[in-house]
Image (tube, coloured by chain):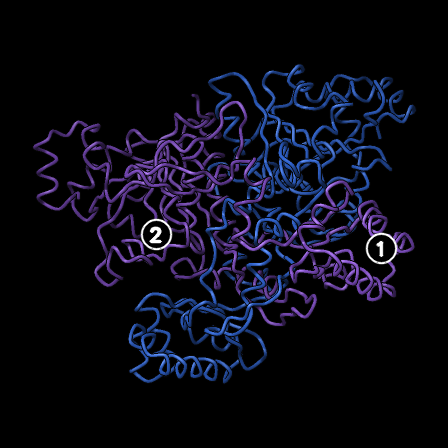
Chain colours: A blue, B purple
């Protein structure tokens, strides 16, 4: 059994955080149907752009889902969408506030179809406020939330931070947070619905997520922190170091063959000249052997030292492979692709990758049959271009 | 007022790591949280210092607020009397969250096996560096290590230069990405296990690892857009030496940007790499003509993806942040004021709340023990022998 088995989720026009949110819930067992919008509409263009621009993210976010394309500008198309909403538990969308009103798929419209619907909108800035009408994405949320400037300030060497210009994000923290905040809120609303019998509207903003966790940041380079950071090895690779406890620090120095006077970190840190000496020792020592040699030497030593992998190396790591954190799947167009696994291990109701991301509209027939449309009606809808 | 998780009872045995933040999000949504604080560790920094929690964990800036909506009791779980208190709490709880290396709590008699015998419906969530199994399960670690193993350090480090900011080596992101990811997965996994319990009738041992949480974190592939070369994904310096971020990566928003800046001729050249450098220079010279504030005003009705790059100290005064109540001014009992971050998970019919401020040292020991039917004399006895504080 899967944890969220039996929970039905509809996504409309999703390509960013809401698609990722639906993907995580799908990994845990929810049945997710993507309503793709017709070719050429603005929402379709954004989806197509997202698909083309980052195929891997698209494939992973949309695995375990079904897809139906519906022309929401037609009465027949809206009828299909409304039938899907009527039997759904959750609706996920990420368009600018108000854009789904014409298709009567805004919260008010969906609530008339089902009192039990949990309606979750994930947008750059939220459903209200002076920026709510603006388009945006991870980049703008991280810019406004102060993250980009914060990353820029982290340049320079340890102990000598440099006030640098802001940095463009690579890891999409704002997007990830919005997606997971959405999933948390949805499950909380589903939990509440058990007793209240009613769904509700959820309003998630990427900017809110960034602001809420400004407090979570590294002390990083503001101080000369010997035990943390990254050191280059002989082969131009790196090891990551975080020997923050008194004993893990001592074990580190001992294993590196450093002098005994380095083993008490509080003493070393208290004396700036000594700290710089130890810093240089660490830098030079790590350059004498290749990364993987160091990893073998440190195997079994109680200290925090790990290899720094390139993303493509992760699958070969013994821990990550044992935890099934990289799974190989075959995409709908026949390519083999490594995707991440499921980070939430619920042993009695484990998540699963059950199917690859769908091609747009591939499940139209199956979805319509479930809604009670017969073969003739389906053919008629297809011929009229209402579904695809 | 109804809160969505008001009937969920959680025991937190954590520190200041992701487990604490995960529970904090559930507490904001109404869960009743009892935080069990261990006695101070002899070899760790002294309690009361600003930099460290009592159990020696570094407190990130603003970290104390993560204990709002929680009650706190101090238990010395090495003593059988304290374990009895724990068992009574576990009997009436739905969730236990802990963040110790595998086996540590088993030895104290409060591991999953023991607790599930007392309460088969308990959801016991362990949040660790590398998980409950595998060759690294006993390894300690920190953000740099987990991101290193998960392949994410190269993503934060080779952060693809723009305007002279080119970083060639892996580097730890300032925004502790592990913390973000693992804390969110903790909250999600607990909720999923609660919903599953409705069907199975049983709890389970949920296993969340910091390292696992990072493997799937979304990133923009280091392709041409993100190399910082594309004028559509770029930072531009303004007249007042601040920056505007431009992320107009699709045709519509790129075209709108070009029109707004009087560069109609560039509107169709989003993908013309031969022109990128020239376009970026042209746009830079335009952006240099106004201040950041003026540009932000200018772009309010241009339907394109642009935002000012704000420093952290400017964020609290942003009108959107204010309107969304993402910074809350709260009253302290001594008449002072404090500022907390607001609640992101906005459930409009049953919104989360800050119901109480972070507890002071073991503030609720008496209250919790009384609730468990200990007499005044019994509580005094527990204090005398050092089982509680």
Residue name at image x 77 percent, y 34 percent? A36
Q: Residue at x 28, y 58 (%)?
A: B49
Count of labels in the image = 2
Q: In the picture, which quadrant includes the C terminus of chain B?
A: top left
Q: Nearer the viewer, residue A189 or B195?
A: A189
The residue carrying mark 1 is B270
Mark 2 neighbour class, 10 Å CA radius: few under 14, some 14 to 19, many 20 or more: some
Decide which of A20, B126 is in the foreground and name it: A20
B54 w.r.t. A105: above or below: below
Q: Nearer the N terminus, badge 1 or badge 2?
A: 2
> Where in the figure is residue B153, as x and y percent of width and height?
56, 63
Secondary structure of residue under mark 1: loop
User: Counting other residues with Cα less than 10 Å from the Cα at mark 1, is it few (<14), some (14-19), or many (20 or more)?
Assistant: many
Q: Which residue is mark 2?
A: B100
State left or right for residue B69 relative to residue B262: left
Residue at position x 59%, y 67% in the image: A164
Q: CA distance from mark 1 to mark 2?
A: 51 Å
Could you tell me residue A54's position as x and y percent?
A: 73, 52
- Tell me which residue sits at (92%, 24%) in the image: A383
Residue A13 lies, in percent from the top left, at: 74, 35
Chain for disc number 2: B
- Horizontal side of residue A265 vs A13, given as left or right: left
What is the quadrant of residue B8 in the picture?
A: top left
The nearer-to-camera label among 1 and 2 is: 1
Q: Chain of mark 1?
A: B
């Amino acid at each position: 059994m899967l944890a969220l088995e039996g929970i039905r989720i509809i996504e409309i026009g999703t390509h960013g955080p809401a698609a990722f949110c639906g993907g995580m819930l799908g990994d845990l067992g929810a049945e997710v149907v993507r309503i793709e919008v017709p070719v050429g509409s603005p929402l379709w263009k954004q989806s197509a752009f997202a698909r083309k621009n980052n195929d891997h993210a698209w494939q992973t976010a949309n695995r375990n889902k079904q897809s139906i394309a519906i022309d929401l500008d037609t009465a027949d198309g809206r009828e299909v969408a409304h039938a899907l909403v009527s039997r759904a538990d959750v609706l996920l969308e990420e368009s600018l506030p108000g854009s789904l009103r014409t298709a009567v798929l805004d919260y008010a419209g969906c609530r008339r179809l089902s009192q039990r619907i949990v309606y979750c909108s994930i947008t750059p800035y939220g459903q209200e406020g002076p920026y709510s009408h603006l388009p945006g994405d991870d980049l703008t949320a991280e810019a406004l939330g102060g993250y980009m400037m914060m990353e820029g300030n982290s340049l320079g060497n340890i102990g000598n931070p440099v006030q640098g210009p802001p940095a463009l994000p690579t890891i999409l923290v704002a997007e990830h947070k919005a997606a997971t905040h959405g999933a948390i809120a949805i499950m909380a609303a589903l939990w509440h619905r058990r007793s209240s019998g009613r769904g509700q509207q959820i309003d998630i903003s990427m900017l809110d997520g960034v602001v809420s966790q400004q407090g979570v940041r590294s002390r990083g380079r503001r101080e000369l922190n010997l035990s943390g950071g990254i050191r280059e090895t002989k082969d131009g690779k790196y090891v990551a170091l975080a020997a923050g406890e008194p004993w893990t620090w001592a074990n580190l120095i001992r294993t590196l063959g450093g002098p005994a006077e380095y083993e008490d970190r509080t003493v070393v840190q208290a004396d700036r000249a000594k700290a710089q000496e130890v810093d240089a020792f660490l830098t030079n020592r790590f350059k004498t052997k290749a990364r993987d040699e160091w990893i073998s030497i440190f195997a079994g030593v109680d200290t925090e030292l790990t290899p720094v992998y390139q993303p493509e190396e992760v699958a070969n790591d013994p821990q990550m492979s044992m935890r099934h954190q990289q799974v190989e799947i075959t995409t709908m167009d026949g390519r083999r692709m490594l995707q991440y696994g499921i980070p939430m291990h619920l042993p009695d109701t484990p998540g699963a990758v059950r199917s690859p991301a769908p091609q747009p509209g591939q499940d139209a027939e199956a979805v319509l049959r479930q809604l009670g449309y017969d073969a003739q009606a389906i053919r008629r809808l297809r011929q009229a271009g209402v579904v695809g | 007022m109804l809160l969505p998780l008001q009937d969920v009872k959680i025991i937190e045995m954590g520190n200041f790591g992701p487990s604490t933040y995960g529970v904090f999000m559930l507490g904001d949504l109404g869960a009743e949280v009892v935080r069990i604080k261990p006695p101070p560790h002899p070899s760790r920094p002294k309690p009361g210092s600003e930099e460290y929690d009592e159990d020696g964990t570094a407190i990130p800036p603003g970290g104390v607020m993560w204990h709002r909506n929680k009650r706190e009791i101090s238990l010395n779980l090495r003593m059988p009397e304290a374990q009895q208190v724990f068992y009574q709490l576990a009997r009436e709880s739905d969730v236990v969250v802990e963040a110790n290396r595998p086996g540590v709590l088993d030895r104290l008699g409060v591991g999953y096996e023991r607790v599930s015998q007392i309460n088969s419906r308990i959801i016991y969530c362990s949040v660790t560096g590398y998980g409950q199994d595998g060759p690294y399960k006993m390894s300690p670690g920190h953000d740099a290590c987990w991101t290193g193993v998960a392949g994410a350090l190269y993503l934060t480090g080779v952060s693809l230069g723009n305007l002279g900011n080119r970083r060639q080596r892996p580097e730890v992101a300032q925004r502790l990405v592990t913390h973000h990811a693992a804390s969110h997965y903790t909250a999600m996994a607990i909720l999923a296990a609660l919903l599953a319990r409705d069907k199975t009738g049983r709890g389970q041992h949920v296993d969340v690892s910091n390292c696992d949480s990072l493997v799937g974190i979304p990133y923009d592939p280091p392709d041409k857009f993100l190399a910082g070369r594309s004028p559509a994904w770029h930072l531009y310096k303004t007249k007042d030496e601040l920056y505007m971020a431009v992320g107009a990566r699709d045709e519509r928003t790129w075209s709108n940007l070009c029109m707004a800046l009087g560069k109609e001729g560039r509107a169709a050249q989003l993908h013309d790499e031969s022109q990128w450098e020239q376009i970026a220079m042209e746009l830079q010279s335009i952006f240099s003509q106004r201040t950041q504030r003026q540009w932000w005003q200018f772009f309010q009705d241009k339907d394109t993806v642009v935002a000012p790059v704000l420093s952290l100290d400017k964020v609290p005064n942003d009108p959107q942040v204010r309107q969304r109540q993402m910074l809350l001014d709260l009253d302290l009992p001594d008449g002072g004021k404090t500022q907390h971050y607001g609640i992101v998970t906005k459930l409009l019919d049953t919104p989360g709340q800050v119901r109480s401020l972070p507890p002071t040292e073991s503030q609720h020991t008496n209250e919790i023990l009384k609730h468990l039917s200990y007499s005044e004399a019994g509580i005094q006895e527990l204090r005398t022998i050092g089982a509680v504080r």
